[in-house]
Image (cartoon, grey):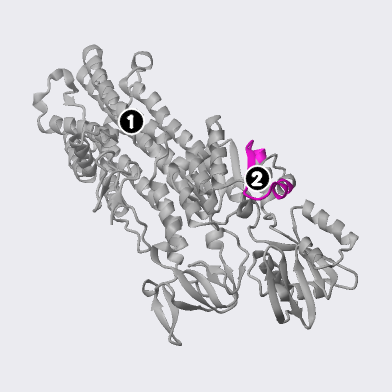
Amino acid sequence: MIYTCPMHPEIEQDKPGDCPKCGMPLEPKTASDGEEDDKEARMLARKFWIGLILALPVFILALGEMIPVLDLKAFIPSNFSRWMQFVFATPVVLWAGSIFFIKAWKSILNKSLNMFTLIAMGVGAAYGFSAIAIIFPNIFPESLKHHGEIGLYFEAAAVITVLVLMGQLLEAKARSRTGQAIKVLLGLAAKVAHRIRDGKEEDVSIDKIQKGDLLRVRPGEKVPLDGVIAEGKSTIDESMISGEPVPVAKKEGDRVIGATVNQTGTFVMNTEKIGSETLLSQIVKMVADAQRSRAPIQKLADQVSGYFVPAVLGCAVVAFIIWSIFGPAPALAYALISAISVLIIACPCALGLATPMSIMVGVGKGAQSGILIKNAEAVEKCEKVTHILTDKTGTLTAGKPQVTATVTANGWDERSLLSIAASIEQSSEHPLARSVVDHAKEKEYALESVDGFQSVTGGGVKGKVNGKAVLLGKQKFIEDNGIALPEELKKKSDALQENAETVVWVAVDGKIAGILGIADPIKKTTPDAILALHKMGLKVVMLTGDNEKTAKAIAKELGIADVYAGLEPKGKQEIVKKLRSEGRKVMMAGDGINDAPALAEADVGVAMGTGTDVAIESAGITLVKGDLNGIVKALRLSRGVMRNIRQNLFFAFIYNVIGVPIAAGVLYPFLGLLLNPMIAGAAMSFSSVSVIGNSLRLHSLKL
């Protein structure tokens, strides 16, 4: 198991620990379906609750000294109260807060000052000064004493420690919550499969299944792994993968996905993918990698943090010096308060969390909606996209030819025409032939046996069905066989071709029986998606290898103005290059191997999950369901995440911009206001909680 830092993915080691750069706990690179390892959360919870119980009496005793109206001195002698504060605060700071001192020391050794450096310095200064004051009170000059006693800051040290622990605990739980999408998916995977071998059926653990094994899946069971149905048919609930609640009909030759739920029928499947090759495993890997990746905007936060910590230390030193020289008596006490407050309130926890938290939650949200994001950079670039370039086949259209029109000649009806056409086409391997056969089977028309089947390359097919001579194919093929074409059907044929449909002619015993219109239909979701993209102010461009006539017909129907047809893979890539050279931000959507170069060339590549592995590997975003609605969702998700990150950075900066000057004492000459270190600690923790809470709002983002 390799562990890495969510904020600094270049940090990797083979055991758990803390990041040497930022101090955050390292996380495993690979997600596990076992019990969540929440040792860190349990440890933080134990320290927080014990620390809180011990810090409360320190806070109450200190409050009694600060607010005379409480008059605790009447019940508790001052000296006893001070020692009690020391006794209760010591385990809070040195035991509960020990993790902060360890991380701070590592940051100094690694020459990478971070938020824990400031926490340790602030808490250490408050506790150390107070401990020396109570153990060795005589070493302090009388000018520092108030009513004969040195002021103590045990309550600040204890309460700050507890507040920071609370922030760390919330952060640990939030990080755990962002991984729930992965853990839920992993938990849904089947654990056992019914393997058929040598005619016998046996129950076998999933990890023992090999490629090529035959597995039986019964109604109500989960599909064990990815494969193809070899026998039987059923309907399968694929909502966990696609988000679509309607079960999908499956028959022999159809692919099935591991962890989806079989509904009605029993079938035997041939296993094709196991282990890390399955779609579920690939989804988990992509989501985990993306959650750990860093958006370019994170570089800004890192650069600011690099200058921020030394600047804060400088502010604390300057505040201490100015108060020591110009502050009222006891000046040293005021100087110490302001320096400690600056160190505490300036803790950059929120700054460090601003980007990673939003990315982690956003990527998890995307995974639950069928949007698999490869890295955080894709999220940021997605927001700036101006042009959507999309392939036609398989992206705008279904990518599977279907019979869309049946026109019969006199004396023929649809059933008779389709039945005889499908009968002769069942012997052909051509994709158009498959569409005719599938259409007839869907309508449950009977198919007859064929005698003397013959395929004519580039023309059509012929043979005998029930003793009748049947010809099926292109118009020229029919005419070359001396068969006259009715003028009425010729006009219908021209009209179908104008609508980008391929026309197949059917002749029986030397006379025309009818024509079939075959087309790659537009996906039902495509028109609404195109409309939504236009409303978002984006330019949609179609790139296709298909002929110009077909491409323009589909583009016209969808309201796409820019069309490039007859393109090879290099041609698509060149168009992407040209637009980018003009300063456009390009998103390319495709599903085939021929789209891979353009997907890689684009600012953001979007692959359809129904497409090839090469296309998916070349893209920054993969849509499990494989339609343009996914792009609309991805764009909305990107805009929501980036808006959330900017809000987080605002929260992080505004606390420091307002808090540091107040903590340094700029308001004291005007309002007599000097920030108590304890209030500074609360403000610092609240900034982190604000960032975490704001990031978690992405769970409710409507896509």
Position of residue 259 relative to residue 612, above or below, is below
- The disc placed on residue 429 is none
Front position in the image: 468 or 247: 468
684 horizontally vs 482: left or right: left
Q: Nearer the viewer, mark 2 or mark 1?
A: 2
428 horizontally vs 634: left or right: right
Q: Alpha carbon of mark 2 to alpha carbon of mark 1: how far?
A: 50 Å
Q: Which residue corresponds to the image point at 75% horizontal and 77% vertical from the top-left? A: 445
Which residue is disc 1 drawn over?
305
Q: Which residues are magenta?
A: 534-553
Q: Give the SS element for disc 2.
A: loop
Q: Which residue corresponds to the image point at 56% horizontal and 29% vertical from the top-left? A: 582
| Tag 1: amino acid | Ser
Quarter-of-image position of residue 571: top right
Position of residue 580 relative to residue 252, above or below, is above
Q: Residues within 10 Å of mark 1 (few under 14, many from 20)?
A: some
Position of residue 256 relative to residue 671, above or below, is below
The answer to whether residue 406 is visible is no
Quarter-of-image position of residue 295: top left
Which residue is disc 2 drawn over?
565
Q: Residue furthest bottom?
A: 199
Front position in the image: 456 or 278: 456
Q: Give the SS element for disc 1.
A: helix
| Tag 2: amino acid | Ala
Magenta span has 215? no
Q: Which residue corresponds to the image point at 9% horizontal and 25% vertical from the top-left? A: 139
Q: Earlier in the sequence, mark 2 or mark 1?
A: 1
Q: Residues within 10 Å of mark 2 (few under 14, many from 20)?
A: many
